[in-house]
Image: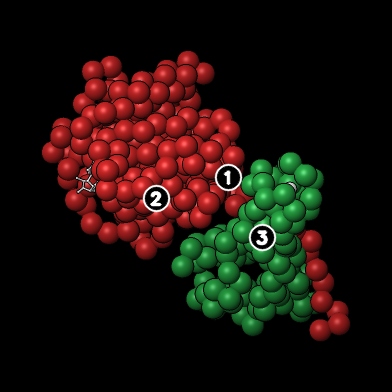
Chain colours: A green, B red
């Protein structure tokens, strides 16, 4: 459920960026979803048609999602580990003190445009 | 599909929200108004606590309360009955307030003359933490019955807060809430965060939180 409002923001951002670039039809958008954001890609796919409804620029647009792993560096023994898989605990020394190295962001990576989807000004 | 062109965007999706939130913070600084974003699960005691501290705070400050809910107006009615300037914001199904909704609510509330505005956010430990509302200070409330493990399950909420309140401490004897474990979990996520233990029912610990609100308000007003 909480995916829907951030997906709306992503779609608005893509729409604005596309219009700023004279794009009238988007072939695909790529979102990068950090593992630690708690957003589940399956819900993005489910809500995408709902959120883009009545927006002609998104007609036939595909949603691509790439995942960014939630890696951390243990502050006590300097081991690198995956936060999700290890449930936030260093598998080497058992410490919870860590520096998160990635997986917290939610980005609009790129917008793909068909050639016929450009305004020729 | 071979000749598809690509625009490299690589921008955080919340960038626009963050920009709006910063604008709200600047505007509130100009108005000498401190906006406190109160976040918690449903029923953790937000409304009861706000009613308890408003009593004391209004001796020195002009206070307003914005109640954000998906539906209903009962909390706003309780605030109004206590003589507080209040406004109900309906989020229209959204699980949290974002900066655009907050900006619109602030315009309608017309509270530029207020010293303190409390925003009682939608009851939820996940979504409110993801949306910067432009508040001057973020406060999370967790009640004793919810358990000391919540920072492990909802880390973002505890990371972004300036203060965390453990409420309903009068119910301690029925639950096994471990203060030290909780303190440690919060400080791992957010070492600078202030921690308050209080009961809005008995009044225990409420003054300390009230003093913090006053100090933060004066800080905003002097900035
Ligand atoms: N024992 C005890 N009960 C409390 C305390 N604070 C609030 N309550 C009770 O907890 C229930 C919920 O309190 P509210 O203040 O309505 O909680 P809320 O967080 O505003 O709830 P929503 O806005 O519905 O999410 C009420 O029955 C309150 O009387 C407290 O310090 N101790
Ligand atoms: Mg309430
Ligand atoms: Zn380690």
- With A42 as the anchor, is A85 left or right in this view? right
The answer to whether residue B140 is visible is no
Quadrant housing residue A35? bottom right
Q: Position of residue B54 (x, y in %)?
A: 25, 29
- Mark 3 — on which chain does it sit? A
What is the secondary structure assignment of the residue under circle 1? helix
- With B139 as the anchor, is B18 left or right in this view? right
Look at mark 2 in the image and give the residue it sits on: B147
- Specify which label sits upstream in the sequence, 2 or 1: 1
Name the image quarter holding the C terminus of chain A.
bottom right
How crowded pointer 2 is (Cα within 10 Å; few <14, some 14-19, many 20+) is rated as some
Taking the spot 53% from the left edge, 42% from the top edge, the residue there is B185
Disc sitting over residue B18 in the figure: 1
Residue situated in front as seen by the camera: A92 or B5? A92
**Separation of marks 2 and 1 at Cα, in angstroms:** 31 Å
- With B43 as the anchor, is B195 left or right in this view? right
Quadrant housing residue A114? bottom right
Residue situated in front as seen by the camera: B39 or A70? A70
């Amino acid at each position: 459920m909480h995916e829907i409002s951030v997906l709306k923001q992503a779609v608005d951002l893509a729409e604005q960026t596309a219009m700023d670039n004279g794009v009238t039809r988007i072939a695909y958008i790529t979102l990068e979803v950090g593992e630690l954001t708690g957003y589940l890609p399956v819900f993005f796919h489910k809500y995408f048609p709902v959120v883009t409804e009545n927006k002609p620029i998104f007609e036939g647009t595909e949603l691509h999602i790439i995942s960014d792993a939630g890696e951390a560096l243990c502050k006590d023994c300097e081991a690198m580990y995956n936060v999700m898989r290890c449930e936030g605990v260093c598998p080497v020394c058992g410490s919870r003190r860590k520096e998160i190295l990635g997986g917290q962001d939610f980005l609009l990576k790129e917008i793909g445009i068909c050639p016929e989807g450009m305004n020729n000004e | 599909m071979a000749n598809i062109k690509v625009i490299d965007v690589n921008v955080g999706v919340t960038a626009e929200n963050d920009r709006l939130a910063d604008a709200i913070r600047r505007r509130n600084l100009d108005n000498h108004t401190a906006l406190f974003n109160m976040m918690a699960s449903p029923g953790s005691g937000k409304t009861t606590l706000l009613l308890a501290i408003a009593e004391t705070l209004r001796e020195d400050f002009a206070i307003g309360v914005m109640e954000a809910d998906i539906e209903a107006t009962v909390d706003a009615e309780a605030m109004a009955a206590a003589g507080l300037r209040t406004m109900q914001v309906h989020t229209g199904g959204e699980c949290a307030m974002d900066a655009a909704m907050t900006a619109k609510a602030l315009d309608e509330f017309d509270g530029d003359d207020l010293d303190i505005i409390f925003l009682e956010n939608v009851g939820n430990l996940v979504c409110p933490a993801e949306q910067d509302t432009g508040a001057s200070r973020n406060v999370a409330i967790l009640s004793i019955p919810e358990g000391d493990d919540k920072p492990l399950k909802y880390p973002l909420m505890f990371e972004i807060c300036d203060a965390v309140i453990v409420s309903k401490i009068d119910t301690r004897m029925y639950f096994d809430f471990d203060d030290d474990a909780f303190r440690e979990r919060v400080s791992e996520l957010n070492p600078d965060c202030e921690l308050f233990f209080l009961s809005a029912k008995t009044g225990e610990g409420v003054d300390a939180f009230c003093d913090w609100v006053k100090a933060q308000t004066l800080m905003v007003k002097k900035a």
